[in-house]
Image: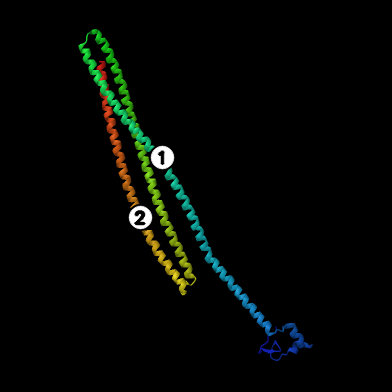
Amino acid sequence: MVRQIGTKKTVEGAILMDGLQFDDYHSPGPIGEHLRKNGCLRSAGDWEREGQQEIKSCIANYVCQIEEKNQDIWKPEQKKDQKAIELRRVMEEKDRWVQEHNHRITQIQQVACEKMSKMIEDSRRLDKELMIWQRKNDIRRKQLEELASKSNTENKTKLKEDIEKNAKEKESLNLAMQKQIEAHSELFHLLEKQELQGDTNDALRVLTNLERQLDSKHELELEREQLNGELEVRKHMGADEDTKLQEQLDKMRKKLVEIDEEIEYAKDTNQTCFDNERMASEDLEEAKKEMIRALEQRSGKLGARSNMLFWCQKDGQA
C-alpha cells in the first residue's frame, strides 16, 4: 500500500492517490517500479472486505469477553448448587442415623421397662409370701411354747424338737428376708442406673431435636447468604438499569426479609422446645424418685421384720 498525503479517489474500481494513475502503477519506468515495490493496488471491494473482516474480528473478541464474564458469574452459581446438594445429602444421612439411633434406644428402653416391671412384681409377690410365712411361723412358735409349758417331760422333749425345727424355719425365713433386702438393694441400683440412662437418653433426644431445628435454621441462613451473593452479582451486572432484573431484585429482597422472619421464629421455637423438654425431664425425675422412696420404705420394713425374727430366734434358743 502506498502511503502518501493526498485525497483518495476511485478511478476504474481502484483506489488511487492524487497525481497517480492506474497506468502509472503498471508503467515500466522507475515510478511504476517504485509503486509496485512499495505499494499495493487495491479496489473498493478489497477495502470493504477488509473492513468486514475487522468488524468480525472485533465481534468475535467481544463474544469471547462476554463468555469469560459469564463463566466468572456461572462458576459461583455452580459451586453454590454443588454445596447445596452436598449439604442436602449430609442432612439426609444424618437424619437417617438419628432415626436408627432413636429406634435402637426406644427398643432398649422398652426391654428395660419390661424387665424392671417384672422385677418389681416378683419383689411384691415375695414380700407377701414372706409376710405370710412369718405370721404362720410366729403362730406356730406361740403354740409350741404354750404346749411345752403345759406338757409332761416326754412331751416336752418332743415339743423341744418341734421348737428347734421352728427355729430353723425362722432362720431360713430370716435368710430369705435378707436375700429379699439384697434384691431390693440391687433393684435400687438398677433404678438409679436406669434413671441416669434415661436422663442421658432424654438429653440426647433434646439435643437431637435442637440440632435438627438448628440445622433448619442454618439452611435458612445459608439460603440468605446465597441470595445476598446473587444480589451482589446482579448489582455488578448493572441490574438496577433493567426493569425486569430490578423486579427480580425486589423479589429477592422480600424473600430475604421472609427468611429473616423464619430464622427469628426458629429461634423462638427452639427456646420453647428446650423449656418444655426441661419441664418434662424434671417431672420424670420426680416420679422416679418417688418410686425409689417407696421401694426404700418397703425394704426398711423388711429389714425391721428380719431383725425381729433374729432376736426372737435367739430368745427361743435360749
Q: Residue furthest left?
A: 150
**Residue 176 seen:** yes
Q: CA distance from mark 2 to mark 1?
A: 30 Å
The image position of residue 48, as x and y in percent, is: 65, 82
Give me the residue at 27% from left, 11% from top. Answer: 158
Give me the residue at 46% from left, 74% from top. Answer: 243
Q: Amino acid at mark 1?
A: Ile
Name the secondary structure under disc 1. helix
The image position of residue 140, as x and y in percent, is: 25, 18
Name the secondary structure under disc 2. helix
Local crowd at mark 1 within 10 Å, few (<14), some, or many (≥20)? few
Residue 187: name its quadrant.
top left
**Residue 306 seen:** no
In the depicted view, which residue is nearer to us: 56 or 21?
56
The label nearer to you, 2 versus 1, is 1
Local crowd at mark 2 within 10 Å, few (<14), some, or many (≥20)? some
Q: Are marks 2 and 1 in contact (CB under 8 Å)?
A: no
How many marks the image carries: the answer is: 2
- Rendered image coloring scheme: rainbow
The image position of residue 303, as x and y in percent, is: 28, 27
Question: Is residue 6 shown above or below 310?
Answer: below
Reading the image, the residue beneath label 2 is 269
Residue 36: name its quadrant.
bottom right
Reading the image, the residue beneath label 1 is 108
Split into 4 quadrants, where in the image is the C terminus? top left
Question: Is residue 270 shown above or below 58?
Answer: above
Q: Amino acid at mark 2?
A: Thr
Split into 4 quadrants, where in the image is the N terminus? bottom right
Q: Earlier in the sequence, mark 2 or mark 1?
A: 1
The image position of residue 81, as x and y in percent, is: 50, 60
Q: Is residue 183 shown left or right of residue 47?
A: left
